Image (spheres, helix red, strand yellow):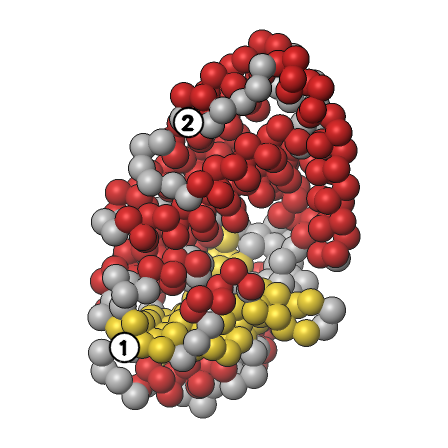
Amino acid sequence: MKISIIVPVYNAAQTIQRAIKSIDTKHDHEIICINDGSTDNSQQVLEQLRKEYSNMVIVNQTNKGAAASRNKGLELITGDVFMFLDADDEFLTSRIDYMADYYLSDENVDIVLGQLARDVYGTWTAIPTHRDIQKEDKVNFSQCPAILQSIGPGAKMFNARFAGERFNEDIVFCEEHEFMVQLYKKARDIQLLPDVVYGYNEQIDSVTYNRQQHFDAYMKDAIKVRSSVMDQLHLREARLYYSYRMDELIVSYLIQAYLTEHEKLTQATLNTVINYINEMQKTDYDGDAMFRIVKVVEQGTKNWNKALYDQWRSTLISVGIGRPKYVLFKANALPKRAKYKGETTLKKYLRK
């Protein structure tokens, strides 16, 4: 069996060597690196690595984004299966072959799904929200919509028959969701594994900066992605799982990250959030996800005035969420906001 490993690279000179050296397999394999218009010395580092890895292919292109880079890699694969590795991340030792053994043991398995982990004080720790799929089991999408919790392309091995699928290049934020949903739906069997296979090294400063600088664009992308994915999900249970994943674990935290740095509520910000809430009404959604968005906005901002609040209250009442009148809201909002700020500060500290 031959394994194709696609590695999008953008300004990753400090991490790409670690990523490439983590590719640990006895199987025939190729490493396809797409240098996406890097402005640091990523290209030079890749060229140096190619002297050591004769099976490495390097493609240099103008900056087009992660989706276009992955699509270019999919065009070039020659393997029986393919995997993705972000240039910041790494495979854990022997885990590629661990996944390959499961893939080879059953010809009906189209996707092997291992666990992704973050480094917590020097220990790889699996994502807690993925606990429903942290098991050894063979499933399909209709049996196990919980696989939507693992919505990114990392920590997975895919049958090369899916190489014709493409990421949406018109979207920057959550561009992988549509791709992954299509593959989950088309897969015959999906092999779940309980063990961590892939280490995710989040670049905190970069993520925080992007959330602050591109909030409006990200929220617009979130609406597009949500609409497209929900149209593809025919089972109500799957739509509720996706709402939890998208609305609560992604969008509410995107809003929270932005409001942490922009506490004064503006008309534009309120309109952006209201547009998203209205989009949620077009399909099923998880109630806890909705209430978390409400909590983030009400307790994470200041500068409310009667006009802004009346617009907010009217929107929520229209979707079945009762809110007090402005005088009562103003009397109760500040104490709760102070408590909320304390909670989020503690969570931020604990994540360090």
Give percent across and percent down for residue 346: 76, 49
Q: Is residue 13 above or below residue 341?
A: below
Mark 2 Cα-neighbour bin, 10 Å: few <14, some 14–19, many ≥20:
few
Q: Is residue 259 left or right of residue 234?
A: right
Q: Residue furthest top?
A: 307
Comparing marks 2 and 1, which lies closer to the viewer? 2
- Is 320 in front, or is 161? 320
Mark identifier at residue 32: none
Query: Which residue lies under the disc numbered 1?
Result: 109
Residue carrying label 2:
320
Residue 112, picture quadrant:
bottom left
- As rendered, which of 169 and 276 lies closer to the eye? 276
Q: Residue at x 68, y 74 (%)?
A: 123
- Residue 302 in the image: x percent, y percent? 70, 23
Nearest the eye: 183 or 247 = 247
- Three-letter code for the amino acid on which mark 1 is drawn: Val
Dividing the picture into quadrants, the one containing residue 103 is: bottom left
The answer to whether residue 4 is visible is: no
Q: Position of residue 278 (x, y in %)?
A: 40, 27
Mark 2–mark 1 distance (CA, rounded to whole Å):
44 Å
Q: Where does residue 262 sit, x and y in percent of width and height?
A: 69, 29
Seen at 23% across and 49% down, the residue is 234
Residue 128 appears in view = yes
Picture quadrant where residue 164 is located: bottom left
Local SS, label 1: strand
* Residue at the image point whose x is 49% and y is 82% from the top: 95
Task: Assess disc 1: are there few (<14), some (14-19) or many (≥20) residues with their C-alpha within 10 Å of its C-alpha.
Answer: many
**Image quadrant occupied by the C terminus:** bottom right
